[in-house]
Amino acid sequence: MTERQIGSLSVSPLGLGCMNMSSGYGPGDDAISNRLLNEALDAGYTFLDTATLYGGGHNETLIGSALRHRRNEYVLASKCALSRVDGKNHIDGRPKALRAQCEASLSRLQTDVIDLYYLHRVDPAVPVEESVGELGRLVREGKLREIGLSEVAADTLRRAHKEFPVAALQSEYSLWTRTPEFAALRACEELGIAFVPFSPLGRQFLTGKARDVSQLPDDDLRCTIARPRFEPEAFAHNTKLLEPFSDVASRERLTMAQLALSWLLSRKDSAGRQTLIPIPGTKHIEYMQENWVAADRLLSDETFAELDALINERTVSGNRYSDARMADTDAERDRAAAGSQ
């Protein structure tokens, strides 16, 4: 199994998204999460992803407690700027706020340094150069090793990279969410920035196990920010795509989840390199183990193209976010720019 690069960091081709253990998809179980985290390292995962936002700091505390004795065995990524205030997401990209969040993250994670620290979202009230400049100072002080951005448009990424070298861009990317293909992936390749897809399984849809909003709790992310594709009418349309997708999975002797991850891992840049590092999230040990199989399973060019044509934003019904959230997401400006050309 060949490791992949994020700046100076070498990581497993598949990372572990840890959010689900604390928030987003119902309650987690700390005892099970502790086992999951340790078994993930045993399986071969060397890249873990968390954030200040997840569970209001609970997720970082969980990882710090579960893995403090194994800190040298994995690359640790966390995020700043986005937090919960009075039950709502709040963005604060001011340098002093980012520094305070970094110090708090270091404490919760029980570590002296965070390997990769993302600006979780760009604060529209603060120039990205100011936010990234402060993260750069934290790198020089030895509190961070590399910095990243999340859900930004290509021009924002370029501006940030001029201020301080950006090692990674993390944005939603999967068969059914293709926003990065408008411009971000090209920018990453040109600048030598790693791309880390979150929600690579389409918020469970691509596993074949998802349900529509009528069968989900009100606080589930598929009922809030990601609702359009899970509305009953859109979901019924989208589910029709899963039968041929399942047929391909059976042919490849993979589960649907493994096939979706293998599609990302098999994607080549213009030089033929396979560099993406998906971070599927789960709070279930069996799903973590299932996903890991994909880390060593690349698809043929023919199968990649077959899936590319089967499930994409032209065949899927509904946007990935609500209209308001689409308008507020910096990364979606690349879609608007492409549409105006």
Image: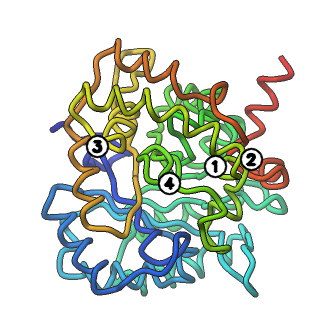
Residue 2 in the figure: left or right of residue 242: left
Instruction: Please tell me which of labels 3 and 1 falls first in the chain.
Output: 3
From the image, tell me which residue sits under label 4.
210
Q: CA distance from mark 2 to mark 4?
A: 27 Å
For disc 1, the neighbor class at 10 Å (few under 14, some 14 to 19, many from 20) is many
For disc 2, the neighbor class at 10 Å (few under 14, some 14 to 19, many from 20) is many
Q: CA distance from mark 3 to mark 1?
A: 21 Å
In the image, 132 versus 19, the foreground residue is 19
From the image, tell me which residue sits under label 3.
13
Q: CA distance from mark 3 to mark 4?
A: 25 Å
From the image, tell me which residue sits under label 2.
330
Q: CA distance from mark 1 to mark 4?
A: 24 Å
In this view, the mark in front (1 or 4): 4
Q: Residue 115's spot in the image, x, y percent?
A: 37, 62
> Tag 4: residue type?
Ala
- Quadrant in which the N terminus is drawn: top left
For disc 4, the neighbor class at 10 Å (few under 14, some 14 to 19, many from 20) is some
Q: CA distance from mark 2 to mark 3?
A: 27 Å
Which residue is located at x 48 percent, y 79 percent?
105
Which residue is located at x 71 percent, y 67 percent?
93
Asked if marks 1 and 4 touch (Cβ < 8 Å), the reply is: no
Residue 276 in the figure: left or right of residue 313: left
From the image, tell me which residue sits under label 1.
151
Q: Secondary structure at mark 1?
A: loop
Is residue 167 shown to the viewer in this render?
no
Which residue is located at x 72 percent, y 41 percent?
318
In this view, the mark in front (2 or 4): 4
Q: Residue 217's spot in the image, x, y percent?
A: 61, 73
For disc 3, the neighbor class at 10 Å (few under 14, some 14 to 19, many from 20) is many
